Image: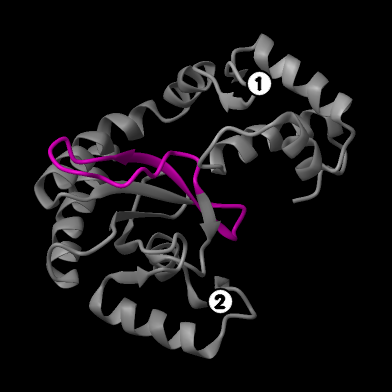
Amino acid sequence: MSDTVPGGSQTLSRGIRILELLASSDRALTIDEIARALDVHRSVAYRLLRTLEHHDLAGRDDAGRVRLASGLAALAYGVSRDLQQAAYPELVAVADEVGMTCLVAVLLDGAEAVTLLSASPRNGIGVSYRPGHRHPITRGAPGKAILMALPEASWPADLPDDLRAELETSIDRGWAESADEVVRSLSAVAVPLDLPGQAPASLAVIHVSLPQEASALAERLRVAAGRITASAGR
């Protein structure tokens, strides 16, 4: 992603990129890693980080590695309060019932699926899949379920023929599935999720294995998706 924003602030764009990098990483990052990702000098990355720390959006651990900070939670809660109230109880219910992590992913910039909310089963071992995790909509069940809800004219022009055929099959049966496409060893099942006034979205479960038939998991997700849509539309 370019840091050059027509008519915008390059400094602000770089600060946002740091937050995106931290959100999509499964570990804390060093300042040098952040500087390389932004293609800037270490001193520039450090100044940006200091500003984010001042606003409690990022912080450093004892080893100096950078993580997201608690200030983001307050911002996220304010932006998606209604959606969280509608969706989170359903995510928890599905996660506990099927023993898999359940998540909501939304379309970002027309090309990526980003995890907005997630819940792990309270009993058993869930897969860590934090909000902010993003991947192309052409990979992984959450992304492909978003594509299912889009008109075919909005699909990427360079969509491979085999993926186009898979999507057509997924549309006919009402759900998408994947294995080893985004994170190695993880399987997923997802259905489109209609969120009034929100970007196209999907509801998915992920795990290292599927404890039930994919069709049964999809049916449970469809029920939950219907409840979330009804609640969000109040």
Based on the displayed image, in which of its 4 quarters is residue 85 positioned? top left
Pointer 1: residues within 10 angstroms few (<14), some, or many (20+)?
few
Q: Main secondary structure of the magenta part?
A: loop
On the rendered structure, is 171 left or right of 224?
right
- Give the mark nearest the N terminus, 1 or 2: 1
Q: Nearer the viewer, residue 55 or 62?
A: 62
On the rendered structure, is 109 left or right of 165?
right
Is label 1 in a helix, a strand or a loop? loop
Q: What amino acid type is highlighted by mark number 1?
A: Gly
Q: How far apart, in angstroms, are the residues tagged by discs 1 and 2?
A: 47 Å
Residue 126 makes an appearance in the image: yes
Q: Nearer the viewer, residue 32 or 181?
A: 32
Query: What span is in magenta?
Result: 107-133
Residue 104 at x, y percent in the picture = 35, 47
Residue sitting at x 53%, y 16%? 71
**Which label belongs to residue 153?**
2
- Residue picked out by circle 1: 64
Residue 159 at x, y percent in the picture = 58, 80
Residue 198 makes an appearance in the image: no
Based on the displayed image, in which of its 4 quarters is residue 15 positioned? top right
Q: What amino acid type is highlighted by mark number 2?
A: Ala
Pointer 2: residues within 10 angstroms few (<14), some, or many (20+)?
few
